[in-house]
Amino acid sequence: MLKRALLAVAIAAVALAGGAVGVRSLVDARCFSLAGEPICRVETQAPLVALTIDDGPTQEGVDAVLPVLDRHGAKATFFLVGAEVRKRPDLAARIAAAGHELGNHSYSHSRMIFRPAAFYAREIAETERLLAAAGGGSGLFRPPYGKKLVGLPRAVERQGLIMVMWDVEDPVTADPQVFARQVVAEAQPGSIILVHAMSRRSPVPRQALPLILDGLAQRGLRVVSVGDLLAATERSGVNGPSGGP
Ligand SMILES: [Zn+2]
């Protein structure tokens, strides 16, 4: 009897652990969501990739990144944190004035799972207001840490925004050359590339950025904002972000 009870407890523990792993992989899934449809890449043969730069704005990030993008004739989408935009609206305005796209990366950059609906709504709306004041939001949202479950995607959709994930992300390495090589190798037409070039903790993504842009150009891939990637894909009549009919 005791044995059977122990067995039942063991089975329950395994099921719980499995469930937890399942929920975790759902929370972190780049291309799937329980509510709404996140975009992590688009299907296209056009030689275009979107560059996205997350967090900030930071002074060192903006100072380093804008001239590099300009030299390469590249456009990017900057997913900015509302609280940081509030501190430095001038930096957000500089990014927009340089012709790049401003995206919403929440207000507080907290993990946006298991929170009340009103929390998501506030985080998104307040940041949209700040982006509009800085030169215009793009209607694109990226979840902090890429984490989402049900409440956040619903709130994003309800506010008329599109959730944008990515299919190529910055590798973990202290070597800008290795960093750039890996990003360039993984990029495909229609890719959405994430580089943390605003980071205050590490200059490596910033140092890698010009090498990435050189490498992508050598592969014949043009670097555009997410909005431009979506627009070009729709215009060319190939499958859109939802993967076609
Ligand atoms: Zn972030």
Image (cartoon, grey):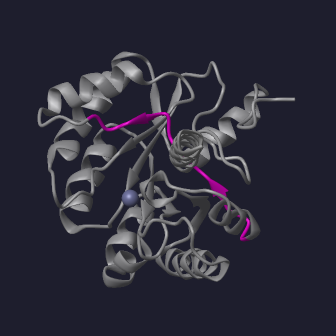
Q: Give the camera-side residue of 56 and 75.
A: 56
- Residue plotted at (51% across, 42% down): 10
Q: Residue furthest front?
A: 1
The percent position of residue 176, horizontal first and vertical second, equals 16, 33
The percent position of residue 222, horizontal first and vertical second, equals 46, 29
Q: Quadrant of residue 63?
A: bottom left
Q: Give the camera-side residue of 8 and 222.
A: 8
- Residue plotted at (72% across, 64% down): 154
- Residue plotted at (66% across, 26% down): 43
Q: Give the camera-side residue of 7 and 57.
A: 7
Magenta region: which residues? 159-171
Q: Quadrant of the C terminus?
A: top right
Question: Up-down: is 220 above or below 61?
Answer: above
Q: Quadrant of the N terminus?
A: top right
Q: Give the camera-side residue of 238 and 194.
A: 194
Residue 174 drawn in magenta: no
The percent position of residue 115, horizontal first and vertical second, equals 57, 74
Q: Main secondary structure of the magenta part?
A: loop
